[in-house]
Image (cartoon, rainbow, N blue to C red):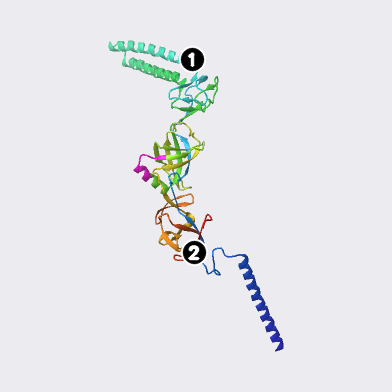
Amino acid sequence: MIVNRVKNRTILYRLLYTLVCVAVGWWLHGRLNPLPYGGAFDNGPTQVLVRSLSKKDISQNKKYIAAIEAINSVDIVPQVSGYLEEILFEDGAYVNKNDKIFVIEQRRYKADLLSAEALVKELRNNYRRIASLHKGKFVADKELDAAESALNRAEAALDLAKLNLEHTEISSPISGYIGKALVTKGNLVGPETPKLARIVQLKPVRAAFSVSDKERAWFMQKAAQTNDFEVDIAMPDGTTQTIKAENLFFGNEVNPDTATIPVFVDLPNDDGVLVPGNYVDIYPRFEAKKDALLVPLTALSEDVNGTYVMTVNDKGIVEQKYIATGEVIDDMQVVKEGLNGDEKVIVQGLQKVRAGAEVIATDAKGNN
């Protein structure tokens, strides 16, 4: 019996010792790690971080990355063979449509033309003679037909000789900037030559970017409502220009990898700053949205009734407000309905509050 009493006392002492250690440890933890927003051992109001709503013009905030493309571009390829005799442009110069830019040796083609002209003259005289004899029934129909066929073939050869001679002088088919000559004078060129130069139209150019299906519907709606479609473009020199678009259309397929569809916008580019191959930031502006109400995405919550935010009024009381949302811009949500702009929304501590609760609100930027 005595042994059992000793064992029971030992167990009791150990249990009391353990409880005392736990209590002291928990007290030290509370002293060294105070709860910042209130908790189970803080009977005061919960502390939360709040942010005031912002109003701003968001017409430039819907950003897309656009590739600048040439609407028209041409590779200059010879149609006839011969030695390159003349290059009639400066590398990188602007050329107008129909400006002469290359000359291929012409002697052979001029000789071919003279020969073809002489043959046509001969066969035409021969045809007239046979036709006259045929009229007097001195030759058979077969001879007349043969003379006519020979004349037709000669005239076709003459047309080809004229065309070949014309092709020895190469003119620009479009207006634009021509790059460097890819073949120098004296080289033998022909239809098998990849190209002599490339001409790219810079006025206008085309900006291409991709949008989601939802955004495509928005673009189509806005395009149908107005002809004054403008875009803001962040230029390569760091400036931003507002440009009136000349045309807007969509691609005919959705990219299955990105679930987006391309949008194409034609831009005047009168100053030639935009160069095909550039990537720029583009901001569509169907309409200026001034004083749009924005709320941080971190303040949003959802339930079966919709999207809502928790706000704190002047008395420090939490209120739940359902909102109608618009587009998302960076880390901000456009609010169409439900807020007047004077509220302060909770952005941290949402999981610890409920509507009607009293809280201590601290501005997220550090101002009470």
Query: Looking at the rendering, in which quadrant would you find the N terminus?
Result: bottom right
Label located before the other in sequence (1 or 2): 1
Frontmost residue, 75 versus 346: 346
Residue under numbered circle 1: 107
Q: Position of residue 358 (x, y in %)?
A: 47, 65
Query: With respect to residue 72, does 19 lie above or below?
Result: below
Name the kind of residue labelled 1 in the image.
Arg
Name the foreground residue: 17 vs 7.
17
On the image, the x and y values in percent for residue 350 come to 49, 61
The residue most toward the left is 136
Q: Position of residue 332 (x, y in %)?
A: 47, 51
| CB contact under 8 Å: marks 1 and 2 | no
Total marks in image = 2
Find numbered disc 1 in the image and state the secondary structure of the residue it sits on: helix
Classify 293 as above or below 188. Answer: below
Above or below 29: residue 66:
above
Label 2 Cα crowd, 10 Å radius (few <14 / some 14-19 / many 20+): many
> Which mark is in front, 1 or 2?
2
What residue is disc 2 on?
359
Q: Is residue 253 magenta?
A: no
Instruction: Judge whether residue 138 can be spotted in this image.
Output: no
Q: Position of residue 51 (x, y in %)?
A: 48, 56
**Which region of the structure is painted magenta?**
220-230
At x 37% / y 44%, what residue is drawn? 222
Q: Can residue 107 be seen in the rendering of this structure?
A: yes
Is residue 213 or residue 3 the one in the foreground? 3
Residue located 65% across and 75% down the image: 20
